[in-house]
Image (cartoon, rainbow, N blue to C red):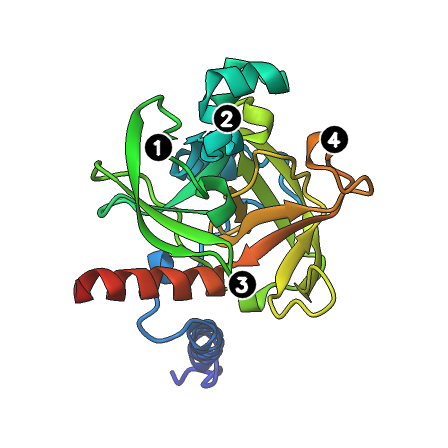
């Protein structure tokens, strides 16, 4: 006898066909959302974000590349030949200790761990008789200048160590007002200290007629932070902390009031490249 339901077997096949068609369309949309050949490791890695509970993973990743710098600076009185005479010193009431070199503290960042290159501010090492770099793990190394740029207030140093932690240079031109940043340095010689804040302004001169342009941040920066790192949430170096604004305008009493300045990483790249070219030319 003939089957009275000739269309019945076709219904499940039609449903299956529709399901497979929908799956193919959805798969194609997802595939178009990912770039061809992209892999997860090639994508920018965000180590911290505004919604995270802690900046600890970011700090743990980046802090080992930030160093403390100690310098031995000769006394200005030592340069005066009159003060070399003990009789004149006694007559002028100047103690012998005033002619002794003094220690000063600053910060720096390892930007090439394979070559032992450290970037800091020029004013941190200016007139120094000796420079010592202390890593986060406590190791200490004598440092030699590779490149000095007084106008841009940057200095490239080299230490005798290899395979060091490195802080990659980010693109400071992409910074926007409101971006979160972290500052790491050695304020007041206390040791490595971490603060955080946002970008307050970009392309900021420090005074009238100043052709240089700085990143302004409210991340607390204090004396001793000079030469330290300003880091974005990708764990990249976007600036070298260099100056702070103080209403007193006195370095001895200067402290953070929420206005600090950093040299953009794009300037750091230029100075490092020039230092390496000069080294090759020697």
Image quarter of the N terminus: bottom left
| Mark in front: 3 vs 2 | 2
Residue that carries the numbered disc 4 in the rendered image = 253
Q: Residue at x 21, y 37 (%)?
A: 160
What label sits on residue 130 in the rendered view? 1
User: What kind of element bears circle 2?
Assistant: helix
Within 10 Å of disc 3 (Cα), the crowding (few <14, some 14-19, many 20+) is: some
| 97, above or below 144, in the image | above
**Which tag, 3 or 1, sits closer to the chain's start?**
1
Image quarter of the C terminus: bottom left
User: What kind of element bears circle 1?
Assistant: strand
| Mark in front: 2 vs 1 | 2
Kindly indicate whether the residue at mark 4 contacts the one at mark 3 (C-beta within 8 angstroms): no
Kindly indicate whether the residue at mark 2 contacts the one at mark 3 (C-beta within 8 angstroms): no
User: What kind of element bears circle 3?
Assistant: helix
Q: CA distance from mark 4 to mark 1?
A: 26 Å
Q: Nearer the viewer, residue 245 or 185?
A: 245
Taking the view exactly as shown, the residue that stands out farthest to the right is 247
* Whether residue 121 is visible: no
The percent coordinates of residue 174 (x first, y second) are 57, 67
| 28, above or below 71, in the image | below
**Which tag, 2 or 1, sits closer to the chain's start?**
2
Residue that carries the numbered disc 2 in the rendered image = 83
Q: CA distance from mark 3 to mark 1?
A: 32 Å
Q: CA distance from mark 3 to mark 2?
A: 48 Å
């Amino acid at each position: 006898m003939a089957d009275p339901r000739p269309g019945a077997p076709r219904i499940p096949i039609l449903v299956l066909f529709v399901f497979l068609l929908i799956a193919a369309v959805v798969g194609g949309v997802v595939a178009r959302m990912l770039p061809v050949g992209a892999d997860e490791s090639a994508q920018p890695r965000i180590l911290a974000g505004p919604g995270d509970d802690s900046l600890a993973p970011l700090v743990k990743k980046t802090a080992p590349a930030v160093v403390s710098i100690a310098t031995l600076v000769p006394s200005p009185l030592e340069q005066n030949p009159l003060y070399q005479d003990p009789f004149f010193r006694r007559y002028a009431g100047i103690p012998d200790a005033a002619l002794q070199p003094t220690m000063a503290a600053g910060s720096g960042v390892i930007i090439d761990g394979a070559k032992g290159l450290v970037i800091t501010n020029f004013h941190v090492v200016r007139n120094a008789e000796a420079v010592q770099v202390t890593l986060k793990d406590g190791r200490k190394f004598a440092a030699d200048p590779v490149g000095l740029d007084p106008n841009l207030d940057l200095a490239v140093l080299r230490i005798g160590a290899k395979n060091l932690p490195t802080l990659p240079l980010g693109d400071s031109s992409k910074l926007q007002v409101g971006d979160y940043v972290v500052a790491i340095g050695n304020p007041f010689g206390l040791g490595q200290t971490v603060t955080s804040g946002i970008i307050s302004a970009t392309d900021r001169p420090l005074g009238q007629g100043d052709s240089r342009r700085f990143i302004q941040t409210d991340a607390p920066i204090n004396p001793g932070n000079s030469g330290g790192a300003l880091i974005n949430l990708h764990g990249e170096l976007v600036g070298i902390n260099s100056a702070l604004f103080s209403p007193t305008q006195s370095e001895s009493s200067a402290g953070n009031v929420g206005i600090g300045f950093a040299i953009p990483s794009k300037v750091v790249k230029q100075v490092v490249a020039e230092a390496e070219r000069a080294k090759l030319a020697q």
